[in-house]
Amino acid sequence: MAKDNPPSTKSKAPPHKKQAAELTRGKTHNELISHGKSLKKDLRALPAEQRSKILSHFHGSERDDLSKARLKNLKQDDKNRDTSKLSEYQVKSLNKRKAKPNMALQRQMHRRETKRLENAMTAADAEEILHTHTAGLVEVETDMEKTIQLTQHNLKNEHLEENVAQNIYDLDLNEYGPYKLRYDRSGRYALLTGNRGHVSIVDQHSMSMKTEFFLQDSIRDACFLHNGSMMAVSQEKNVFIYDEEGVEIHRLDGHRRVTGMEFLPYHWLLATVGSSGVLQYQDTSTGNLVSQHRTKLGPCRAICQNPFNSVLHLGHTNGTVTLWSPSSSEYLVKMLCHKGSPITSMAIDRSGRYMATGGGDSKVKIFDLRMFKEVHSYKTYGGAPTCLDISQTGILGIGHGCHTTFMRPEALKVKMKEPYMKHQLSGKGPLESLRFRPFEDACGIGHSGGISSIVIPGSGEPNLDSMEHFTNPYMDTKQRHEAEVRHLVEKLSPDMIALDLDSMGRIQESNLIQRQQRMRYFAEGVDTKKAADQEVVKNKKEKKRTNAE
C-alpha cells in the first residue's frame, strides 16, 4: 500500500516571488479582491525605500498624486454633469447605467491591477538581485591619508591587477596634434582624431589599431554614430561619414565649418553646430535633414546632449546656455551661466538632473536642471576649464591647463572641500578632450602631445545591460547586424524630444465642456438610431399593407 508523502518542510516562497499569471489565473472575483488587499497590506509594511521602488515600477514614477488628481477631477465632473439639454429618456438611461455598474469590466480591472502590482514587486526583487556589483571608490584608512595623493604610478605598480593596469598608458603623437578622443557606447573602441588630419580607431581590449588613415585636411571634431563601424568627421568645410575601414561613404554638404557634433542614439540623429551658429539635425538612417535652427548667438563651440531626454545644450560666447529640440524653432530654455565669460565646456550627468559648465572665468558651476538654478561652483587653477565630463557613476572630471581634477559623485549635490583624485600632464596643455570610458574605470585625455589614459577607480558602471543597443563590448558580427535592425525598428521620432518626458503618453486632463459635448454627441447618436429604427419599422408595415391590398 502506497504511503502518503510527508509534508514538505521547505518554506514557501512569498506571494510576490511567483509569476503574476500564476497568481491571477483561475481565481474568482472575491479571491482577487482579497489577494489585492493582502498585497497592499504587505506593501504598506515594507520600508519606505523598498516601497518607493515598487511604486515606481507600478505607476511608472514615484509620484502617484497625478493619477489621484485625475480621478478626483473625473468624479467631480460626473457629479456636476449638465443634463439640461438631454431628454427625459436620455437622463433615465444615464442614471440606469450609473446605478448598474459593469461587473465584467470591474473584474477585468481588478485582475489587471493585481497583475501589475505582482509584476512591480517581482521587478523590484529582480533589481536587487541582479545589481550585485557596486562601484568601488578609493577609501582611506586613516585621517592622515588622502585619495588625492594617490598617483597613477602607485596605482599601476602597487594596487591594480594586470588587466586593469593596462588602461594606464601614454601615446606620444606630437606630429599631428592636438588630439581629441571619443569612445563608442560599449567602451570597446576609441576614436582618435588629430587636428592635422590623423584619424584612427583603437580596440581597447586588444590594444591594437583597427583603422588608421590620414586626411589632407584639418579636423575640427569627430564622433561615432550608432556603433563603432561608422563615424562622422568634421573637416575644414564639410562633414564626412566614414566606415570602419576608412572609406568615405557620404558627404554632408549642408553642414559647413562644424565645430561640435553629437549623435542621438535613440533617434538616429546627428546634431551639428558651427561657427555660423546654425544647429542642424540630420537623420543618419534616411539621410534627410530633419530640422535647421539659427541660434542667433554667434559661433558655438560647446555642445552636449542630455542623456535622459536627448535635449541638446549649446554653450555660447556670451556666457549663456540654450536648450534645443528638433521640433522647436526657438530655444526651450536660455540660462545665463557665466556672466561676461564664454562657455568653454559642458557636461550632464546620467540622470539628466545636474549640468556642469566651464567658463572663461576659470570657474566650474553646477546647475540643477529641474529648477534651472545654480547649486554651487568650483574654482580652477592653471587655466580655464577646457573640457568636462561626468562618468556613469557621477564622478566629475575637469581638464584645466595641463591638469585634470576629479571630484566625487557627491560633488554635484554638495560642494566638496577637496578633490577625489588629480593628474598632471606637464607641457601638454591646454587639454583638448576628457572622456570617461563606459563600463570601465578608465578616463581618456586628449592633448597636444597625443593621448593619455588613466585609471579612476569607481568611475565605470559595474552592471552591464546587454539588452541595451550597442552597449555589449563582446558583440560579434551577427549580433551587431541583428542589433542594427532591431534598433532601426525601435527608432524614436524626433518630435518625442522634449524637456518633460512625462508628457509623452499622459492621459489628457478632464475637461467639463468636452465631456458635455461628448455626452450630447452620444445622445444625438442614440436619437438618430432610434428614429432610423422607427422609420424601418414603419416602412415594413406599409409594405405589408400594400401587399395585402
Image (cartoon, helix red, strand yellow):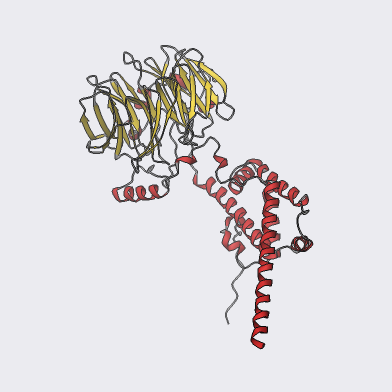
| In this view, 59 is above or below 291 | below
Q: Position of residue 378 (x, y in %)?
A: 51, 17
Out of 130 and 267, give the one closest to the viewer.
Answer: 267
On the picture, is 395 further left or further right than 480?
right
Q: Quadrant of residue 18?
A: bottom right
**Residue located at (31% from left, 39% from top):** 228
**Residue located at (71% from left, 49% from top):** 74
Which quarter of the figure is the C terminus placed in? bottom right
Q: Quadrant of residue 384?
A: top left
**Residue located at (52% from left, 24% from top):** 334
Q: Position of residue 509 (x, y in %)?
A: 65, 45
Q: Is residue 140 visible?
A: no
Out of 534 and 108, give the one closest to the viewer.
Answer: 534
Q: Position of residue 357 (x, y in %)?
A: 48, 21
**Residue located at (76% from left, 51% from top):** 82
On the picture, is 206 further left or further right than 11?
left
